[in-house]
Image: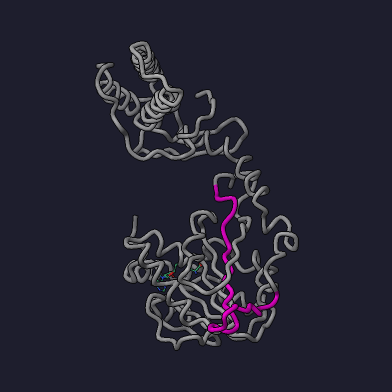
Amino acid sequence: MPNYGEKEYWDERYCEDAGHPFDWLFDFIELKGVIEHLLPDKNEQLFLVGCGNAPFSYHLESFGNYTDIWNTDISPVVIEQQAALFPNQRWDVMDVLDMSIPDSSVPVILDKSLFDTLLCCSGGATKIEMMMGEIHRILAPGSRFISFSLHPIEEVIDKYKNDLYSWKTAFYRIKSKRWNAGKNRKRSTSHTMIVCDMPSSPSGAIAQFTRQPSFDDLVSLFPGLVLSEEEDVALKLSVEPVLFRAAMKLATMDTMLYCLYEALCRYGDEMNDVGRQKSASDKQILIRLKRQFIKWQKERAAKEAEDGGSGDGNNVDGDGDTEVSRNDNSPPFISQGGSNATTTIAATTAKWSDPDAPVPLFKAVGTAVNSQRDTTVH
Ligand SMILES: C[S@@+](CC[C@H](N)C(=O)[O-])C[C@H]1O[C@@H](n2cnc3c(N)ncnc32)[C@H](O)[C@@H]1O
């Protein structure tokens, strides 16, 4: 994975991407209603961290009529490009981990996916703490920090909400408009918006939060965009079978064997849970399953070799929706066939030729593949 935390990575990327503006997660139009609701004062200064070359900055002005926009990013390349294009906005090179800005001085901070960037780079947890510390430090009394993250609420909540910070937090699921029931079904269905309000007086015994409007009512105010937990779960469930089929089609032999192994382990754990020792007959079941599996794989491999492989590189699941592109480095388990698949099957089954050998552990398997659905492989 590229090192998203490095300035050099972004400099290079923005040199290559010059003239190709890109909005991560959302564009301003998608969020316009929510942002205008949370930030009704169009003349208040908006401070953007990790602004990149996103159209978001100038759309805040052109579609949102915000008048005072201060953009910052660690990459001098992108700041120079953007400043030349939009000289009426303020552009500064700044590292969010160490900002040359006085304490308690900024009324509004906006982050779209800088949080994600730092979370996934090396030393991510420390960097996120530093980012939050700096943002918390520069926020003025009664200010508001709005952050948009790729990650679901449960993965981000403790990064924003903990004893280190005096702000009040709220978390929302915002439906991704890039997702739809058609060809984009494998995209994320929703992302997270985090709203942090600073108390109006940092010292009082009881913190007062005067920032208006309150953010409590967003789910009812923006139906279909700001999702309740139930709506989010329903949406994700509706797409799960598609994700599962896609994952199955991408799965390698090792992935499939790993899944089988996991299923058998779960079966073994269940036995232990009910107080039964794994008996000789349990072991026999495991061995029989392994034998059966190997036999089945060999038959498949032979058949695929015979057919000569008819895959065209794409998988279409019958609903006219192209599901997954073939990754040639990762021989697919299903349907493409040909010598690649045969070789992999042969190599993998060789590892399993002794049914008493310890079951090998295979790396990294997608959660969708790992789920325990009763699915037929076509
Ligand atoms: C995922 S992009 C998001 C860009 C933009 N906010 C958007 O929504 O499209 C992350 C941006 O954060 C910037 N960045 C990375 N590390 C940073 C840091 N320590 N301080 C400030 N900006 C940083 C990168 O240069 C990049 O422009």
For residue 145, side relative to residue 114 (left or right): right
Q: Determine whether, in the image, residue 314 is placed left or right of residue 260.
A: right
Up-down relation of residue 106 to residue 195 (above or below): below
The structure residue drawn at horizontal position 48% and vertical position 77%, both measured from the top left corner, is 136
The quadrant where ligand 1 appears is bottom left
Instruction: State the quadrant of the N terminus.
Output: bottom left
Closer to the camera in the image, 44 or 68: 44
In the displayed orientation, state which residue is furthest to the front: 205
Q: Position of residue 78 (x, y in %)?
A: 42, 75
Question: Which one is nearer the viewer's eye here, 240 or 108?
Answer: 108
Q: Is residue 179 magenta?
A: no
Asked if 177 appears above or below 47 in the picture, the reply is above
Q: Is residue 298 visible?
A: no
**Above or below, 36 relative to 176:** below
Q: Looking at the magenta stretch, what is its main secondary structure?
A: loop
Q: Is residue 271 left or right of residue 175?
A: left
Residue at image position (55%, 71%) is 55
Q: Quadrant of residue 304?
A: top left
- Which residue is more in the foreground, 38 or 270? 270
Residue plotted at (66% across, 73% down): 38
Q: Which residues are magenta?
A: 187-213
> Where is residue 319 drawn, in percent x and y?
62, 33
Query: Which residue: 40% across, 82% down?
Result: 99
Colouring rule applied to residues = one colour
Closest to the observer, 114 or 81: 114
Q: State whether residue 350 appears in this view.
A: yes
Image position of 61 (left or right of 131): right
In this rendering, is residue 191 above or below 97? above
Measured as percent of width and height from the top left, residue 300 is found at: 40, 18
